[in-house]
Image (cartoon, rainbow, N blue to C red):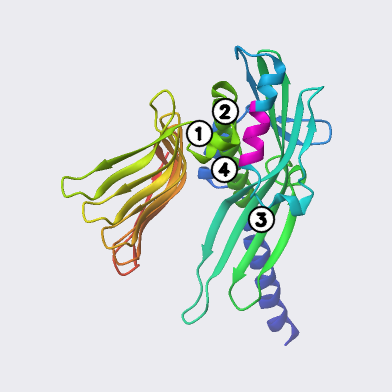
Amino acid sequence: MKTIVTYPIILLFCLVSILNLQTTYSQSEATKKLLAEIEGKWQKDENCNVSFTKVIENINLPKDSIYNRALAYITHSYKDCGCYDEGGDLIEDKAKGIIVQKGIFENTLHRVLPAPSLMPVMIVQMDTYYKLQIEIKDFGAQIIITLTDYHRIMAGGLNSSSRKKYSVSSSFPVNKKGNKKNTFGKTFYKSYQRGQQSFMEIEIALRNGFTVEDFKKGLNGQEYIEYYSNGNIKEIGFKNKNGNKTGELKYYYRNGQLRGIGNALDGLVTGEWLYYHENGQLERIGNYLKNRAYGEWKRYYDNGKLQSVGNWLDDKKTGEWKYYDETGKLIKTENHN
């Protein structure tokens, strides 16, 4: 009798252990591809802190002028970031030419976990906390972004929301033995991409000399409006002194309904963009980096149901893509290598 009971228990234990190992230690091909794309583009110091570095040269200005431009950018861009609760007060040293500010890359991973019928879904979000340091000299600057922590936020399901903190140095891929390789691998990749976007924004600010008031007007630009023949607004935004679209842009359908909204920097669309159907339902949401789609994009039917979801890398589809019909049923899965 003991034998009959013991073997199934042992077998069940083994199966659970195997599944747990696969979930904890395995890494998907999509994650491997994302990390391979940024291999060698980040540094790790003796304390296992991870940083990305950007050197900007040939700015035809002395150190103090570049410092003022950097400070104007930081003052505007980080005033509402919510990182001050984490000790994110600005550190300034004009004599040494150093500015340090803590920041948050919000939503570097977002997942909706499926749930049985009549059960609320669980939403998981990862935010990446980092330190930004700008080191300024005559005619140039060096920007360093150091990733410090991930904050996982879980909401929904049967339990109340929870928050957990993970150090970047102890998580995969910095720690090769770290668990949850897909979760932390994808979060690390998107944090890198967000860092590159920050580099681009800061370089534009340092080279073009934006002030806080300039940002309010669209990065030293003038407002422009284009109209349809029926008198409704077609497009509204700002153009900088070079005539390139910069700042928030809005596009409209002929009937006046919002069609798309997002940001551009010196003529290049960047950051999160949202597009809408004519009935007002969300059509697409995703991110750009220098006019190229990257990261997760979602497309929806005009009834609000998810149509497709997948990732872009350098304006090309990558990894697993899922497609659904108008009722929400999964109809196709594709893998792009």
Q: Which residue is mark 2?
A: 205
Q: Is residue 37 magenta?
A: no
**Left or right: where 10 falls relative to 291:** right
Can residue 321 be seen from the camera position used here? no
Mark in front: 4 vs 2 = 2
Disc 2 versus disc 1: nearer the observer: 1
Residue 308 image position (x, y, % from top left): 36, 55
Badge 1 amino acid:
Leu
Q: Give the residue number, with chain letter if any, for mark 4.
A: 190
User: What's under tag 4, amino acid-wise?
Assistant: Lys
Q: Which residues are magenta?
A: 69-76
Q: Is residue 198 visible?
A: yes
The residue labelled by disc 3 is 24
SS label for mark 1: loop
* Disc number lying in front (3 or 1): 1
The disc at residue 219 is 1
- Identify the residue at image location x=46%, y=80%: 117
How many angstroms separate mark 3 from mark 1 (CA)? 45 Å
